Amino acid sequence: MSKKRTPPSKGRRTRRPKQPSRMVRLFRWLLKLGLVLTVMVGVGLIYLDAQVRSKFEGKRWAVPAKVYARPLELYPGQRLSRDELKQELKGLHYRFVRNAGQPGAVEWASSRARIRTRGFNFPDGAEPARNMLLTFSGDTINDIRDAEGRRLPLVRLEPMLIGGIYPKSNEDRDLIKLSEAPSHLARALVAVEDQAFYDHWGVSFKGIARAMWVNVRAGRFVQGGSTLTQQLIKNFYLTSERTLSRKLLELPMAMLLELHYSKDEILEAYLNEVYLGQSGNRAIHGFGLASQYYFARPVQELDLHQVALLAGMVKGPSWYDPRRHPERALERRNLVLKMLYDQKQISQTEYDSARQRGLEVVKQRSLHKGAFPAYLDLVKRKLREEYRDEDLSTEGLRVFTALDPLVQTRAEAALDTGIQGLEKRYGKRASGLEASMVVTDPQTGEVLALIGGRDTRYQGFNRALDALRPIGSLVKPAVYLAALERGYTLNSMLEDEPLSVKLPGGNVWKPQNFDRRSHGLVPLHRSLALSYNQSTARLGMDVGVDRVIDMLQRLGAERELKPYPSLLLGAQALSPLELASIYQTIAANGFRMPLRVIRRVTDAEGAELSRYPFSLKQQVKPEVVHLLQYALQEAGREGTARSAYSVLPQNLNLAGKTGTSNDQRDSWFAGFTGDRLAVVWLGRDDNSQLPFTGGSGALRVWTELMRRERPEPFIATRPAGIEYVWVDEATGLRSDARCEGSRQLPFVTGTAPRDKVDCGLDRPVERSLDWFRNWFN
Amino acid sequence: MKKVYMMLGVALVMTGCAAPNPYGYKTPVEDRSRTSPSPSPGTAVPVESESGVKVTPIGEMPVIRAQRDEQAAARVQQSAEPVLSQPQSPAVIALLETARQDSSGGDLRMAQSRLERAQRIAPRDPEVYVQLADVQRRQGQFLQAEQVALKGVSVASGQSGALRRLWNLVADIRQEAGNEAGAREARQKAAAY
């Protein structure tokens, strides 16, 4: 600019200065102004261009993290009922059809199923889409073959999407690629929204004119004038407020976008950006998510009539909402189909058959999203230990969890049945019950299911994690384990007699048995199986409260525990999840495994960010835990949990412990079988008294769960340092299988009693009773 | 019935105190060489008497029991320890094989993923723990590797071949981690199978 203002040359100065005419002055002024404006516009364009490019090339969308359930593994020999498989496939929104022609479809017959899987890109390798035939025999998968008849040893289905972690804007989307979209989708969009899309430079005056013509001819507003590019700009870069300046920016930005990117790139961005509906406070963006939301299947699997509906909805997602205004939506869909037909994009047959179809929108938003709030809550807490909220809600992370939807469903059903039974039995006194449950696989330490309250869809107070309640007799295994570790045996005689312990505050602790009686001398295993309080308190006082606390912490308790004597009988409050962690260690022969909910986290592209591998640490010697497992199995066979066997198979060998807190405010059961461990709590939020104990309350729910689970029997593997010895139950002396009153108990080798009872075995010729009578007479 | 015999037992004990011991039994009080805290556990108290007669174990005092008849004895007799080894399913064989390939190709993380998958399907198969522990050993995670191998020992009970391999693996891991004494001990345990 300064150049123009350079002083006149020397030569000119010699001449007589000539006054420029008005016209010239005006022209100069205009020139200057023009230049200034050009520069300003230029700078503005450069700025806009940078904006357009940076947003388009950077991370375009905040994509919420996706949380998946465990994938169902299928293999010959696997125990899986047909109903379970059906439930899983329904959860994955497979279509049950007569002829499975495309992925996501199943042909279902009495003892076989042909499944067209969708395939899934797992972090440890892609599972291809398969066409496979499953054959059942009873409740077992007999055989799996591919389309060519080859045997498949192991297949996994896609994992169920169980939820997402949304940003504050509550925008949710499933990103799709243009190549993945059904071919009709792009055509339909172009047909209804922007017919000149492939010809214009971002702005189409022809398009505007045509739209006006179409609208006039139709006698109503059918088509808008802005191009797809303009619509994308509007949604993508500009705020929703409608001002003139926004509108003015739209045009140059659209043209800039077209300058830099191909039509396909722009269309792909459009497919993922467009707003297509509202689910509560969750905004449904993009065709990927909309397809799931309205039809419960991936966009690739949509048929023409469904594609046409979605394309038609772009104009007004709430006006054409097929759930609220089905007639309006149907009319709109058919209009889209007609336009496609008129433009010769589809054939007469395609047009006719698509028009015949109903809307086929699924009733609810997809069945399983939001169905597991308690588990998802736990997943989020674990994630937040490692990831920032912002990354979780925007980076499109994929989170693979251990949730087993089949187990979760059975747990919920068991809770319902169990509580209904209690309400029937106790009437009003059992009203207002609350509940929580944790189910794990004791072999792997994975949390399979979690219930945070009776309303299992409620995203609120998660009792499995946050309700701290006195654990009652569930503490006893830790007391006995500490004692067994210190040299007691299962055969040690304990005194079940009144005791009083002076507390620092001047109070006296006088524990009572549940039946208000004392039982004299009882062997240690029986004291635990029958859950005697006085003998346990004496044992615990002898071992020392500190050692019991140490044991609880080694087993899995993480909070600080107060060393009061009342801890020995479960005054300490813990959450069901912590208890599951403690019992997990007992079930796993003394190996403590951190309970795992997340298996792996990957970024949007599938690269691994973190994994939570199987890890464990031996905390208690396996021999000592073996002894405790025996006593906990006795609780099932002969003790406080024996009612379980009235329902469950005799060979289950369940091991567990009932728990009832003071004044019967909490009803607990924690127990395990070969491949399932569950902790059940029943109680009330206002902490009022219950009409039942752990054995008559929570145990019923637990039993109902195990009945449905059909778990594997618990087999207590016998560690090397263990021997089984027959002892006399009443005296604890060594005995023999052939002697009355004897029982076989496990001992750490060398700790069994040596002295024997006498039942005449040293005189093998005579039969016992004869001998007995003879001797007596 | 049991109570009747117990009562009889008490009576017999009483007579046993007076008369010479018919079978020359030593004192029926359990001899525990290990000291244990009071109330001394394992102290055998012959019978809880309902009749108010306090029976104290003084001197030689056998506890007499009737014999079970053969049927009852057969009923209470527990079967031998169940055999735990189950045939491997083709699924587990396939996973173990591909894990072996991953592992020898140097892709230890992939091998680990596959082995964890195998563990979920067959958590009581010692071979899964043998391979998993070995992969962790090769990753230098000696502590975890040892624990996984020990977990293998706990599921392999009764399977001597697997136990030998697992203890040898524990020995290797301890050796590599610099725990000479622990390695020797594990080697001895392996030799016992």
Image: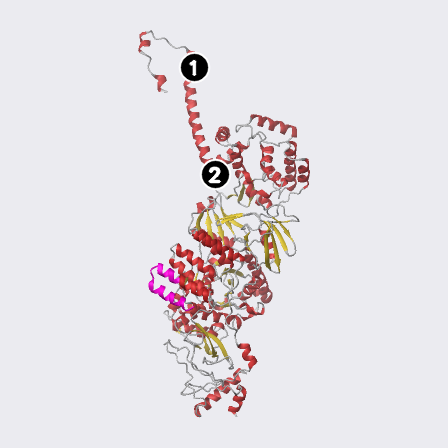
Rendered image: mark on residue A27: 1
Crowd class of label 1 (few under 14; some 14 to 19; many from 20; radius 10 Å):
few
User: Is A621 located above or below residue A755 in the figure?
Assistant: above
SS assignment at label 1: helix
Which of discs 1 and 2 lies nearer the camera? The answer is 2
* Place of residue A323 in the rendered image (x, y in percent of width and height, measured from the top left): 62, 44
Main SS, magenta residues: helix
Q: Looking at the image, which residue sits at the far top?
A: A16
Q: Total marks drawn?
A: 2
Residue B183 counted in the magenta span: yes
* Residue drawn at the location 33% of the way across and 6% of the way down: A16
Rendered image: mark on residue A60: 2
Q: Is residue A590 visible?
A: no
Crowd class of label 2 (few under 14; some 14 to 19; many from 20; radius 10 Å):
few
Q: Viewed as shown, does residue A708 lie left or right of B96? A: right
Residue B21 counted in the magenta span: no
* Residue drawn at the location 42% of the way across and 17% of the way down: A31
Q: Earlier in the sequence, mark 1 or mark 2?
A: 1
**Which residues are drawn in magenta?**
B170-193
SS assignment at label 2: loop
Label 1 sits on what residue type? Phe
Label 2 sits on what residue type? Arg
* Place of residue A516 in the rendered image (x, y in percent of width and height, measured from the top left): 49, 75
* Place of residue A193 in the rendered image (x, y in percent of width and height, measured from the top left): 58, 33
Letter of the chain that mark 2 sits on in the rendering: A
Q: Is residue A350 visible?
A: yes
* Place of residue A649 in the rendered image (x, y in percent of width and height, measured from the top left): 57, 68
State the quadrant of the N terminus of chain A. Answer: top left
